[in-house]
Image (cartoon, rainbow, N blue to C red):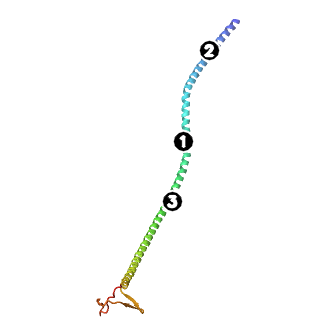
Amino acid sequence: MDTDRITDLVASVSALMERFERRTQQIEGSLQAAHRQLQELSQQLPNTVRRAADTEMQHLRGSIASAVDAGIGQSVSTYQARLETSGQDLRQASQALAAQIHAARALYRHLLWKVVGVCLASLTLIVLGGSWLSRHYYDEIRHYQLSAQLLKAYDAADVTQCDGRLCANIDPTGDTFGEDDQYRPVRDRR
């Protein structure tokens, strides 16, 4: 019985070893399949990580771009609103300045015509006053010129005052003058 038991034990151990070998081969096959899958995964992992990173970067770029656009857009819209307000203020100021320039030109023309009118009136008064004074002094000069000629003749004549009256030394040989030949030349003084 010992041999039978040993034979049974050897058969059992042999069956167990066979099972153990099959199991080991199965595990080895599973491990090799897992190893292959792991190698394939390790080769696919960089591409997968790269794709995922690219997708996340694109999403991140889009998020950043939209955030920047929103911030810049708000700043630009604020700037545009301020620029439009400044433009309107500038237009109003330029229109006010144009109105003031137009009013100043009208005032300048008005003052210019007044100055020209006053100058023409003054010139007319000066010319009229000068011509009146010229005529007046011309008449005065003629009057005094006749008086001067008469005084020269009196001064050259031999005339004197006698008891408050004029006495003359008459030239008896001189020509006679007047309607009735009542006047004769006075002799020159000696």
Residue at 60 percent of width and 20 percent of height: 31
For marks 2 and 1, the one nearer the N-term is 2
The number of numbered badges drawn on the structure is 3
Badge 2 is on which residue?
21
- The residue nearer to you, when weighing 110 against 57, is 110
Under circle 1, the secondary element is: helix
The amino acid type found where label 1 is placed reads Ala
Is the C-beta separation of discs 3 and 1 under 8 Å? no
Give the Cα separation between the discs numbered 3 and 1.
Answer: 40 Å
For marks 3 and 1, the one nearer the N-term is 1
Q: Position of residue 3 (x, y in %)?
A: 69, 6
- Residue 152 lies, with reference to residue 164, above or below; the image says above
- The residue nearer to you, when weighing 41 against 133, is 133
Residue 1 in view (yes/no): no
Q: Position of residue 89 (x, y in %)?
A: 52, 57
Q: Residues within 10 Å of mark 2 (few under 14, many from 20)?
A: few
Marks 2 and 1: which is nearer the front? 1
Under circle 2, the secondary element is: helix
Badge 1 is on which residue?
65
